[in-house]
């Protein structure tokens, strides 16, 4: 279950106030309690990375890597943490990976500060309109970083992510940056690349 601070609807991703800057604090926790993803100091500009190759194996699994202000790699081969669902009403696929800790999350005031991440890649059959943006795909990532702070990332526009899918929709590969093109040379954007292979 996603925390209530994430609001996701067809055609747009909304970010709760204050969460964009969540990777900018400098406090640290005991390394033994650190999460999968760490915060960094200023890392400079970056561009949308290349999309990884689609997985060729049929073994279910997911991997994604963050680079920039937040960095780290999460890997999951636990089928219970993976989901690939087609919604007949919205005509879209949702590929997701969620740690077991995140699945048990029940409120914004007590979210887990370690072993917490969630990734959703949403791929509609046809592009979807929201205001002046046509979305061909959507991505949202939420995690607890090495300071125990809850962070979420999303693509601000359709030019900030690319998603490739297997012809039978059994796997996806994606690339994302959490800054629009005009903002990528300011501050320290974070990029995300990864793959998800669906359970059979």
Image (cartoon, rainbow, N blue to C red):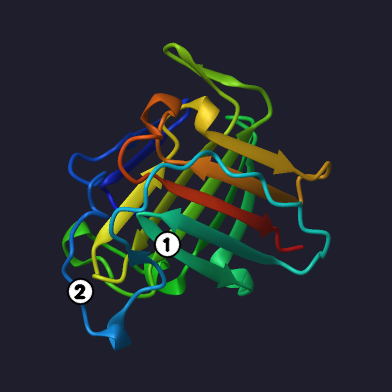
Q: Which residue is mark 1?
A: 71
Is residue 106 left or right of 85 when viewed as pictured?
left
Secondary element under disc 1, as helix, strand or loop, is strand
The circle drawn on residue 126 is: none
Q: Position of residue 52 (x, y in %)?
A: 69, 51
Cβ–Cβ under 8 Å for marks 2 and 1: no
Q: Residues within 10 Å of mark 2 (few under 14, many from 20)?
A: some
Disc 2 from disc 1: Cα separation: 15 Å
Is 174 located above or below residue 105 in the figure?
above
Secondary element under disc 2, as helix, strand or loop, is loop
Q: Which residue is mark 2?
A: 28
Is 99 located above or below residue 181 in the figure?
below
Evaluate whether residue 88 shows in this view. yes
Q: Residue at x 65, y 39 (%)?
A: 163
Q: Position of residue 43 (x, y in %)?
A: 36, 53
Q: Nearer the viewer, residue 90 or 79?
A: 79
Looking at the image, which residue sits at the far bottom? 32
Mark closer to the chain start, 2 or 1 = 2
Q: Position of residue 59 (x, y in %)?
A: 77, 69
Is 122 located above or below residue 150 in the figure?
above
Picture quadrant where residue 51 is located = top right
Evaluate whether residue 1 shows in this view. no
Picture quadrant where residue 136 is located = top right
Q: Position of residue 155 (x, y in %)?
A: 45, 36
Q: Nearer the viewer, residue 43 or 7?
A: 43
Q: Quadrant of the C terminus?
A: bottom right
Q: Nearer the viewer, residue 56 or 99?
A: 56
Q: Quadrant of the N terminus?
A: bottom left
Q: Residue at x 56, y 20 (%)?
A: 128
Is 78 located above or below residue 66 in the figure?
below
Q: Residue at x 62, y 21 (%)?
A: 127
């Amino acid at each position: 279950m996603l925390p209530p601070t994430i609001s996701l609807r067809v055609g747009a991703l909304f970010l709760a106030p204050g969460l964009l800057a969540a990777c900018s604090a400098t406090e640290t926790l005991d390394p033994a309690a650190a999460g999968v993803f760490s915060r960094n100091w200023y890392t400079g500009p970056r561009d949308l990375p290349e999309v990884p190759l689609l997985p060729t194996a049929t073994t279910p699994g997911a991997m994604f890597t963050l680079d920039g202000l937040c960095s780290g790699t999460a890997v999951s081969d636990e089928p219970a943490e993976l989901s690939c669902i087609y919604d007949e009403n919205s005509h879209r696929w949702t590929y997701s990976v969620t740690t077991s800790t995140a699945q048990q999350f029940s409120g914004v005031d007590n979210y887990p500060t370690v072993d917490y991440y969630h990734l959703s890649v949403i791929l509609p059959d046809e592009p979807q309109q929201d205001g002046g943006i046509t979305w061909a795909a959507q991505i949202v990532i939420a995690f607890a970083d090495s300071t125990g702070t809850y962070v979420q990332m999303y693509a601000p526009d359709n030019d900030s992510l690319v998603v490739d899918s297997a012809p039978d929709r059994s796997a996806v590969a994606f690339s994302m940056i959490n800054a629009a093109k005009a903002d990528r040379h300011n501050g320290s954007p974070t990029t995300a690349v990864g793959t998800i292979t669906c359970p059979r």
